[in-house]
Amino acid sequence: MRHFPWLRILVHIIGWLPLAKLIFDFAAHNLTVNPIQEIEQRLGRAALYFLAAALAITPVHTLTGWRSVLPRRRALGLYAFFYASLHFLTFAGLDYGFNLAQILDLVTTKPYIIAGTLAFSLLVPLAVTSFDYFIRRMKKNWKRLHRLVYPAGLIVIVHFVWARKGNLFQLQGDVLQPLLWGLLVVFLLILRIPAARKWVSGLRQSIMGRRRAQTHAEK
């Protein structure tokens, strides 16, 4: 009997929850006095949550040795792209009716929209090449390309801060939530650096070795 894929099922259930909640609140007329803005912000936050979750997979494996979590990285990354796409489509379609002239003006003049567009643009090739076919064909270039997730994660935080009309460096405005997410993303990116991964993995193995030795001594 094959092992029940509970983790894969859980990831997909969680992946659809933000959209299901949004649809429910829309049907219940529970989207504040500015429903378009509420939809746009919720989708943006969902994209950030799943991007952070995808970035956390490698550190979780490094810290715990839990190998079963590694295959879930792709699904989490694709959910991040899915919600980022809906976020962008809400901005372009519901906010501005796909008026290309207005949208082009905004993506070249508004700093937070420039940052959001840049982050989304970096996620596009990652989502397109996330499948096994591209992994086989691109080989080492696939890993090089997917390092774009590092700047994408940081730019998303900048977009979040500027969208809240805050100044992260001077700690002005509504920056607490973006600051906390920014610290988390930076921490996760640091743990993905090879030297940091090697140090953490060695520390984990050392701790596990001492525990095994202690258990053996007690027996």
Image (cartoon, grey):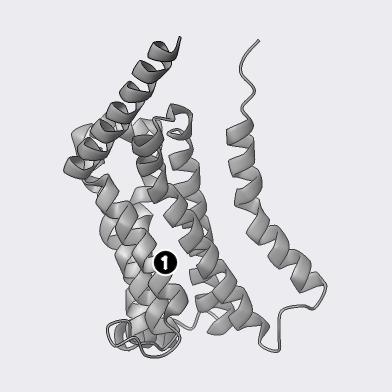
Q: Label 1 is placed on what type of residue?
A: Trp
Where is the C terminus found, in terms of image quarters? top left
Left or right position of 12 against 196: right
Q: Is residue 136 visible?
A: no
For mark 1, does the 10 Å Cα neighbourhood hold few (<14), some (14 to 19), or many (20 or more) residues? some
Q: Residue at x 25, y 52 (%)?
A: 190
Q: Is residue 165 above or below residue 116?
A: below
Q: Residue 183: horizontal and vertical position, in percent?
A: 35, 65
Q: Residue 208: horizontal and vertical position, in percent?
A: 35, 26
Q: Residue at x 32, y 24 (%)?
A: 210
Most foreground residue, 50 or 178 = 178
Q: Is residue 212 above or below residue 179?
A: above
User: Which picture quadrant has residue 66?
Assistant: top left
Left or right position of 132 against 41: left
Q: Furthest residue to the front?
A: 218
Total labels drawn: 1
Q: Residue 195: horizontal and vertical position, in percent?
A: 16, 42
Q: Furthest residue to the left?
A: 195
Q: Residue at x 71, y 84 (%)?
A: 32
User: Which picture quadrant has residue 93?
Assistant: bottom right
Q: Is residue 200 above or below residue 217?
A: below
According to the image, label 1 marks what residue? 181
